Image (cartoon, rainbow, N blue to C red):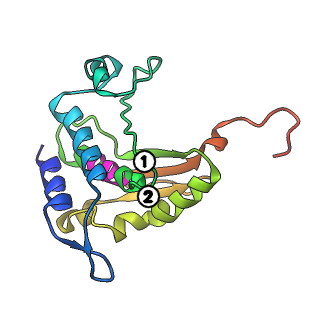
Amino acid sequence: SATSNRLLTYWFDDEHRTESGFPFRFYFCQRESIETLIYLNEIEGVRSFRDLLDFAEHGVIVQPGETKRQRLAFKMATGSGKTMAMSLAIVWSYFHALREPGSTLASSFLVIAPNVIVFERLKTDFGDGATFRRDPLIPPEWQEDFELTVLLQDDPAPVTTKGALYLTNVQRLYEPKAGAAE
């Protein structure tokens, strides 16, 4: 799509600099992850478990019980930039939903950290949308269109923007056991 083309060009062909002036480049595995996500969605039309069966021999892991929502995941090593890969996917999905007629992609997102330590790290990057302002994720001409509210667990703020990112940790999804102190 035109949206994907623009984002891929901006992310990987345009020159970027850090706040201190050093050249900035995304890691190869971040690029490979987002390009694969876009390819599966736009070229192969993967939308469900059944669609993924054709790719099973390529190492795609599927959850047989879940067939209604699109779920794609990528295995990335420690230190390979998983949070940045998630940020790329969020920006791509948001703008695809906004700019591509008939897009089935989301403009709101739920990020669930596996524990409190990871939640705290994600809060640093996603809290107040820091990564979206700091890192070269959004082309300059699209900055005004990026309306994403970031809500951390227990934030009561209502969402009045085009998109939202909810960040919590997995422990918040479980009900407390009877008699346990809250």
Q: Residue at x 31, y 21 (%)?
A: 56
The residue nearer to you, when weighing 115 against 81, is 81
Amino acid bearing label 1: Ala
Examine the rendering and report whether any part of residue 156 can be seen. no
The mark found on residue 149 in the picture is 2
Residue 139 in the image: above or below residue 4: below
Examine the rendering and report whether any part of residue 145 can be seen. yes
Compared across the picture, whether 21 is left or right of 141 comes to right
Q: Residue at x 20, y 27 (%)?
A: 45
Q: Name the main secondary structure of what is drawn in magenta.
A: helix
Separation of disc 1 and disc 2 at Cα? 29 Å
User: Tag 2: Cα neighbours inside 10 Å, few (<14), some, or many (≥20)?
Assistant: many
Residue 121 in the image: above or below residue 93: below
The residue nearer to you, when weighing 155 against 38, is 38
Look at the image and tell me in which quarter the N terminus lies.
top left
Residue tagged 1: 77
Depth check, mark 1 against mark 2: the one in front is 1
Give residue 127's position: percent from left, percent from top: 50, 63
Compared across the picture, whether 136 is left or right of 101 comes to right
Amino acid bearing label 2: Thr
Q: Nearer the N terminus, badge 1 or badge 2? A: 1
Callouts 1 and 2 close, C-beta under 8 Å = no
**Residue 173 location, quadrant:** top right
Give residue 82's position: percent from left, percent from top: 41, 51
Compared across the picture, whether 47 is left or right of 43 comes to right
Give residue 23's position: percent from left, percent from top: 24, 74
Query: What are the residue bounds of the magenta stretch?
Result: 87-93
Q: Residue at x 40, y 40 (%)?
A: 75
Residue 28 sits inside the magenta stretch: no
